[in-house]
Amino acid sequence: MNSKSIATTTLLLAVASSASAEWSFSSGSNPNAFIQTGNMTLELQCDRIRFAPAGYEDSQDIVDKQGLSIRFLKNGATEVGAFQVGADNAALQIVDNYPVEINFNSQQDYDFVLDQLAANASVNLSMIDQDVSYGIIDLQGSSAAIRSLRSACDTDASDGASYEVPEGIVYCGGGAIKRQIEYVILDNPDGEWDARVTVNGDSIRAMTAYSYFGNSKPPAGFVVALLGEDRSEFLIFSEGSANWLEYGDYRYDKCN
């Protein structure tokens, strides 16, 4: 049986198992919109997704591959868009012994995913860059649940959550994906973590790597690499009056 046939069979099984599911919204200190369908759960929080597939081995596979393909379907079969989750745009980990938690690096990326989940009929969560599906989840009723989620999250944000006051060098830009990135080298390291990087207000620990390129000659202006605990990598450059940071495929110029 070829991979296309396997994928088709998987999709049919997933659709059959999700017929009676309904989306719900839960308020409180951790507002979330969620659906439980058959033996799968998809939970949307203010800044992250939790997906519990049919079996633990699927959760382990997603984390091992550090990737998940989120494919949006306007009906049971027609794909109208997709978002490829990977180590360059999100942190993936298993939490509470089972679900995979996807913590997006950019709120813009997460907003796009929420918009598509609210607008379409179903979502296919599948292997990264492959047609093998972990499951299809019905999105009927998701629009109202996501609208309630966003309202609750906006309320929480207006009640006091805000970006940190910059403590170190700040970089802005990013081409198609706008980010404000700040880093500071710590006077008192936390073990191997001797730096902190903040992306659009969300901070992570990082370690410095001054020999990032090994025996190869580093590019002109290279200062240090910051290796985030979520496997993100930030390369710092300074040459003449130019100071910039490279993250993924984008360049960010010093703006403070």
Image (spheres, rainbow, N blue to C red):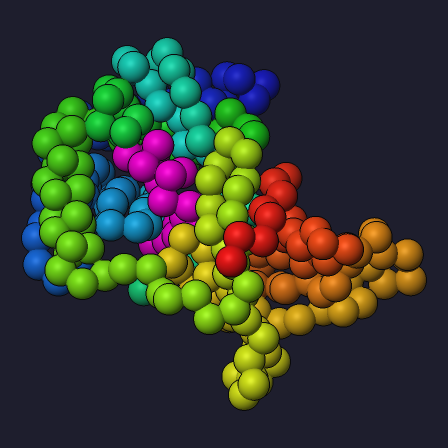
Q: Position of residue 14 (x, y in %)?
A: 31, 28
Q: Position of residue 167 (x, y in %)?
A: 46, 71
Q: What residue is shown at x 85% (from left), y 63% (from top)?
A: 214
Please report the bounds of the magenta region as a residue range.
98-114
Q: Residue furthest front?
A: 241
Q: What residue is shown at x 15% (from left), y 55% (from top)?
A: 158
Relative to 256, residue 126 above or below: above
Q: Nearer the viewer, residue 86 or 22?
A: 86
Q: Is residue 185 visible?
A: yes
Q: Position of residue 117 (x, y in %)?
A: 27, 29
Q: Position of residue 79 (x, y in %)?
A: 40, 16
Q: Nearer the viewer, residue 29 or 106?
A: 106
Q: Quadrant of residue 243?
A: bottom right
Q: Residue furthest bottom?
A: 188
Q: What residue is shown at x 51% (from left), y 31% (from top)?
A: 176
Asked whether, in this view, residue 68 is left or right of residue 113, the answer is right
State the count of labels: 0
